[in-house]
Amino acid sequence: MTRPTGNASQPVETLPTTTLQNQLHRQMIVILDFGSQYSELIARRIRETQVYSEVISYRTSAEQLRQLSPKGIILSGGPNSVYDDAAPQCDPEILLMGIPILGVCYGMQLMVQQLGGKVSRSKRGEYGKASLHIDDPTDLLTNVEENSTMWMSHGDSCQELPDGFEVLAHTENTPCAAIADHQKKLYGVQFHPEVVHSVGGIALIRNFVYHICDCEPTWTTEAFVEEAIREIRAKVGDKRVLLALSGGVDSSTLAFLLHKAIGDQLTCMFIDQGFMRKLEPERLVKLFQGEFHIPVEYVNARDRFLARLEGVTDPEEKRRRIGHEFIRVFEEQSKILGPFDYLAQGTLYPDVIESADTNVDPKTGERVAVKIKSHHNVGGLPKDLRFKLVEPLRKLFKDEVRKVGRSIGLPEEIVRRHPFPGPGLAIRIIGEVTAERLNILRDADLIVRQEINRHGLYHELWQAFAVLLPIRSVGVMGDQRTYAYPVVLRLVSSEDGMTADWSRVPYDLLELISNRIVNEVKGVNRVAYDITSKPPGTIEWE
């Protein structure tokens, strides 16, 4: 047997203490991240099989992995070539642990190289869809059909396999599209089974999770809620918790979960900065206090925020000022309502991955608040206002949060609410934000939402909203010339917001929305439809 080789001088990652403590008792699949844009997606696909998964650094040592005791390990893709001098490499001992491993793209190539095989640049790269020809369906490729379409993205290929490996599948350009050492339970695929374009990709993932790693479907919404309530009560004790409520699904689910766990120890604060959609602040307070019986401290700060944006046209400066003013108001009100020991934040798992879990108090080992998520992490908390954090949702992806919200009684109007930016309508008004322009956009936006709902399309779209432009154009209404603002409609479809396509809604609907806006919203005489996808555009305009 060839012993793995690697770059021993690379630094070893230190795993977050919370991860080690909280996950020891749970079966899990670990994804070692080598910089792939799809690492999060791999984790989501694993969780769709109701098995818990985490993304951790490729620098994690074999000893640290033993402490986590995963049922399986996935080596992610990455942008590098394994033969580059600075190419990231995992601890070679990981391949000798006896734990089932699946290498994906770069991960497969790295495994081959570290076990004594050979990887080199292909004469012909392979990008996009490719037909998979199956040579051996055993284990990994069971129930994956011959000629299934798989998504490729690689310029390198495995030229020589290590001892003990055999080819499971190939494509026209890639002789080693899937490989295995069945005895050692080491597997590799050159394609990306996690992306939606890979037909049969989820079947392959299920084979790895259930048949190879011998996992059971224990990662359920019910199990999460029970565990989260236990953890909240154990952590908080009899202390008070403050939550900045925004009305979105994250903060609302968090409010429900915390209230279920600690009741009146929770204080919800809703800061109305004046940039929400029409009737939303009133509806939010009514829902929480009247129907859910969760008290909400309502703070009307509309005039303060509007004054801070006077004369400001730069979008980044808008965000900065809104974020800083939010912090000021939050600080003032928390001191009036406090004292509080904990700040509740709707941090989600993608945020944790992105931040690399850095906000840890070196003395206590607890995460502390340095940013407020409700405004896209704009503006840090004052140094004299440091809370300990309670973040029950930090293990979850967005779709999992919606499932949790639904399971604990959150109404569908919040669970399935379209994403809404923290700075709100302020970034859907291009140029200076004024009271007049806010009123125009609120009225136009309400019409968009009303008609999308009436036509049964709200839940078919990722987002549907209006944008107000800072220019005026000539129009004709009756016998009079008008000089008024144009409104742009933005209706997009997406799975996760990372990419998006403009929605092909019926022309009759667009016509209806346009007619209503022009006739009902004073100050608007023209409506346009944005048919730009993401990329090259963004979903929001600012």
Image (cartoon, rainbow, N blue to C red):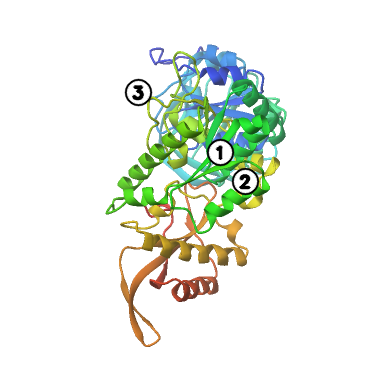
Closer-to-camera residue (32/381): 381
Residue 473 on image: x %, y %: 31, 73
Q: Which residue is mark 1?
A: 268
How far apart are the alpha carbons under marks 1 and 3?
48 Å
Mark 1 vs mark 3: in front:
1
Q: Are the residues tagged 2 and 1 within 8 Å (C-beta)?
A: yes
Q: Which residue is mark 2?
A: 288
How far apart are the alpha carbons under marks 3 and 2?
53 Å
Q: Amino acid at mark 3?
A: Ala
Q: Amino acid at mark 2?
A: Phe
Residue 47 on image: x %, y %: 63, 34
Horizontal side of 59 relative to 220 (left or right) equals left
Closer-to-camera residue (398/13): 398
- Mark 1 neighbour density, 10 Å: few (under 14) some (14–19) many (20 or more): many
Q: Which mark is residue 86?
A: 3
Residue 149 on image: x %, y %: 58, 46
The extreme left residue here reads 311
What residue is rendered at 55% in x and 54% in y? Answer: 282
Q: Pick the quarter of the image with the N terminus.
A: top right
What residue is rendered at 56% in x and 16% in y? Answer: 65
Label 1: element kind: strand
